[in-house]
Image: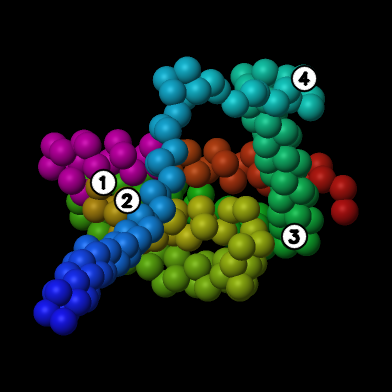
Amino acid sequence: MRGAIARWSLIFGMGFALACSKEEPPSPAPAAAPMPPPPAAPPSAADAAVKPKMVANPDGLSLADRIAKRQAADKKLATELASEEQKRLLAYDKGKLPLHKETFAAIKKYRAAFDKAKTKDDVEKIRNAQQKAIEATAKKMATIDPKGGNSNVTTDYDVMLNALANDYPDALEASFGGDKQALTEQTAELDKRSKKIEDWLTELKSAKK
């Protein structure tokens, strides 16, 4: 009896030991995360050196030729615009010719009177005698172009009348004291504007209506 029990104990022990020796297989390792794609390679020096193809000019002209062509076109347009403006001014002033003649004749008379002065006292006498006449001429002159921008010489008339009322006699008096600079400048300015007016009046007389 004891021998049978011993045999069953031995068998049971061996079975238990064999069962314990069988371990569960290890769980599989988690899958590795996918690798990011490699960064794009920078352009090579050869690629960077490649220049875009130049598109040929449709007109076949070089840059210098195109600049010259544009400048010629601009100059032509400016000439045409100046010609149109000249015609416009001529047409306007032609209709005011009697007033132009009267105004310029008065200006020449006032200046000639001052040029006869020999002393400072002479200048003052002439200045006082002509003051009201110069003012009256200025008012009549303003009727030539009341709105402005239509006459070619009303600005010249205005400058000359103001000079004959103030700066020109002042310069004459200074010249009698030995200072000739102001008179030289005033004379040059009046001569320049007189020439412009004379040329314009000549052109008005010959212009067609």
**Is 149 situated left or right of 29 in this image?**
right
Residue at x 18%, y 46% (from the top left corner): 174
Which of the pair 108/48 is nearer the observer? Answer: 48
> Is mark 3 in CB contact (under 8 Å) with mark 1?
no
Single out the mark in the foreground, 1 or 4: 4
- Percent from the top left, x then y, of residue 202? 71, 41
Which sits earlier in the primary sequence, circle 3 or circle 4? 4
In this picture the colour scheme is rainbow
**Is 90 situated left or right of 189 in this image?**
right
> Is mark 2 in CB contact (under 8 Å) with mark 1?
yes
Which of the pair 115/94 is nearer the observer? Answer: 94
In space, the residues marked 4 and 2 are separated at their CA atoms by: 61 Å
Position of residue 144 relative to residue 197, above or below, is below
Residue 9: mark in rendering: none
**Is 45 situated left or right of 86 in this image?**
left
Report which residue position mark 1 lands on: 172
Residue flagged by tag 4: what amino acid is it? Gly
Residue 60: mark in rendering: 4
The answer to whether residue 79 shows anywhere in this view is no
Single out the mark in the foreground, 3 or 2: 3
Residue flagged by tag 2: what amino acid is it? Tyr
> Is mark 1 in CB contact (under 8 Å) with mark 4?
no
In space, the residues marked 3 and 1 are separated at their CA atoms by: 36 Å
Residue flagged by tag 1: what amino acid is it? Leu
Whether 177 is among the magenta residues is yes
- Percent from the top left, x then y, of residue 132? 42, 72
Q: Quadrant of residue 33?
A: bottom left
Stretch of the chain drawn in magenta: 173-189
In space, the residues marked 1 and 4 are separated at their CA atoms by: 66 Å
Which sits earlier in the primary sequence, circle 3 or circle 2? 3
Report which residue position mark 2 lands on: 168
Name the magenta segment's main secondary structure: helix
